[in-house]
Image: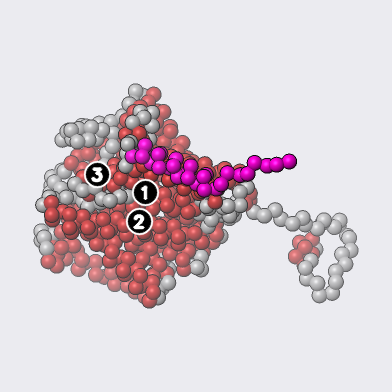
Amino acid sequence: MTYAPDRPSYLRFVALLGFLVLATVGGALLHPVVALAPVLLVAVLWLVVKVPIRYPVMIVTYLVLAVDYVPERPQSGFWPSPLHPLGELLFAQLSYITKIGALRFPLVDVLIVGLLGLAMYRRVTKSKIDPPALPMPRPLIAVVALSLIAILFMEVRGVMRGGDFKNSLWQWHQAAMMPFIVAMFHYAMRGPEDWPIFARTVIAAGLTKAAISVYFGAIVVPSMGVFVEYTTCHSDSMTFNFCLLVATMRFLERPKGAHALRGLLLMFCIFMGMVYNDRRLAYVSFVGCLAAGYLITPWPAFKRTFTRGLVLLAPLLLVYFAVGWNARGGAFAPVHKVRSLIDGEGGEGNLDYRDIENLDVIATWTQFPLLGTGYGHEFLEPIPLPNIAFVFPQYRYHPHNSLLGLFAFGGMVGYTGVWMYLVVTIFLAVRAYHRSHIAEHRAAGLIIVGAVICYINQVFGDMGIISYICTFVVSLCVVASGKLAVATGAWPMPHTALVPPAPSAPVPPPGAIIHTNPGDESQAPALARHG
C-alpha cells in the first residue's frame, strides 16, 4: 500500500501568508486599523489555545487606559495622538468603522465578553492553561450582581414611563458592563500574587498618558497657538491617581531606598502629566486618598502627637485662609485654588453652569425621591440652563454630576442598588489591611480604598459613571479587594472552594474504651472532644 506524500509545509505557510496579505489589503479599504484584523485574528487564535487569560486581559486593560479615549474628545479635540486610531477602534461604535448599522456597540465590549467567555469555557472544560483562581466573597458577588439588576430595573421603569429607549442605553452602558469586567478580572487574577503585575499595567498606561499630556501641552499647543482646557481627558485623573497611590502607599508600608527612588520618579512623571491636564478634581482626589490612608493606618505615638499638633494649628490655618481668601498668588496660591473649587466658574455669589445643573438634577430627584424617573428621561429644568444642544444634543440625559444623576434616575432604591458594591469593596479592603502582615498586601488595601474615592469623585464631578477608564480601574479594585480579603482571612473562604476534608474517624459509643499508643498525641483533639 502506498501513501500520498504530505504537502510541503512551506506551501501551507505561503497560502496562509497570501490570505493575510489579501485580507489586510481588503481591511485597509474600510479603516487603517482594520487592516490589522487578519494578523490580530491569528494572534487571537494563538491566545485561545496557548496563553493564560491574565495576559490578554492585561493587554486590554493597558489599551483601554492608554489609548485616546475618543468619547471625551482627547487633547481637547485639537490633536490626535499616535494612539488615536486604536482609541477610535476600541471605543467608537463598530457601525461607524465597518458601515454595518447593526453593530451599534464598541469593540471593547466584544473584547470583554470574548475574554470572559473564553475564561468560562476553560473553567467548564477544566483546562490546565489557567491555574485555579482564588474565590471571591459571596457578599461581594451579590452586590456586584445587584448593581446590574438595579440598572436594568431603572431601564425598565424608565421605558415603561415613556422614556427614550435609544438615549437610555448610553446612560447606563458602562456601569452595566462593570459586573462583566469584574468577572473577567476575577478569572484573570489568581490572587493577591497577581496584584503587582496588574498594578504595573495601570502604571504603564498612566506613564503613556502622562507622556502624551506633556508632549501635547509643551510642544503641540505652543506651536498651534490655541487655548486648551485639558491635554488628555478628564477620566485620566483616575489612572494618574492610581499611579500616585502605588508610589506613596508602597513606600508607606515598606519604607526603603529603592521604593523611595522609584516612587519619586514615578510621581514626578505622573505629576507632570496632571499639571498639563489641569484637572482640579485630580488633586482633590489625591488629597482625599491621603486623608483616607491617614485614618486607616495604625496610630503610633508619633502620629497621635502630629494629629494633636494639627488640631492646635487649626486656628492659624483659619487665619491663613481668611487673610488669603482674596489673594491670587504667592504664599496664598493654595487658598486661591481651594476658593476656585468652592466658588466655581461663576465667581463668588454667582451660579455657574454646573451649579444650576446640580440644582436642576436635585429638583428632579425631589419629584421622584424613592424610585427616580428611570432611564430614558431628561432631568427637569426649573432653572433654565444655557442650551448646549448644538455641541451635545443629549446633555439633559447626562448630567455632569453622575452621582446626583443616579438619585434623579434611580431614586434612593436605584442609587443604593447600583453603588452598594463600593461600600462592600472598601469594607473588605480595610479588613484585609488590618489582618495582613505582608507589606504588599497592606499597600494594596490602601490603594484600593484610594481608587474607590477617586472613582466617587470622578462620578461626582466629571461623568465618571459613563467612562470605561474609570470603570476598568474600579472593577480591578473590586476583584483585588475580594481576593485580598479571602487570602488574608478577612473574609472566610467560601465552602465550595475548600478542599473536601478527610473522612473523620467514627465516634465511639458512650463507655467505649479507647486504646492509644503512649506519647501519640494525634488523637488528643478527638479525645478532648468526646471525653
Q: Earlier in the sequence, mark 1 or mark 2?
A: 1
The Cα–Cα distance between marks 1 and 2, rounded to whole angstroms, is 9 Å
* Label 3: which secondary element: loop
Name the foreground residue: 260 vs 3: 3
Amino acid, disc 2: Ala
Instruction: Look at mark 1 in the image and give the residue it sits on.
Output: 64
Residue placed at 78% from the left, 71% from the top? 521
Q: Are marks 3 and 1 in contact (CB under 8 Å)?
A: no
Q: Is residue 386 above or below residue 440?
A: above
Magenta stretch encompasses residue 9: yes
Instruction: State the extent of the magenta-drawn residues as a range.
Output: 1-28
Q: Which badge, 3 or 1, comes first in the chain's sequence?
A: 1
- Disc 2 from disc 3: Cα separation: 18 Å
Q: Is residue 423 in view?
A: no
* Residue that extends furthest to the front in the rendered view of this protein: 2
The residue at which mark 2 appears reads as: 205
Q: Determine whether the residue tagged by mark 1 lies in a helix, strand or loop.
A: helix
Residue at 21 percent of width and 43 percent of height: 354
Question: Mark 1 near mark 2, Cβ–Cβ under 8 Å?
Answer: yes
The amino acid beneath tag 3 is Arg
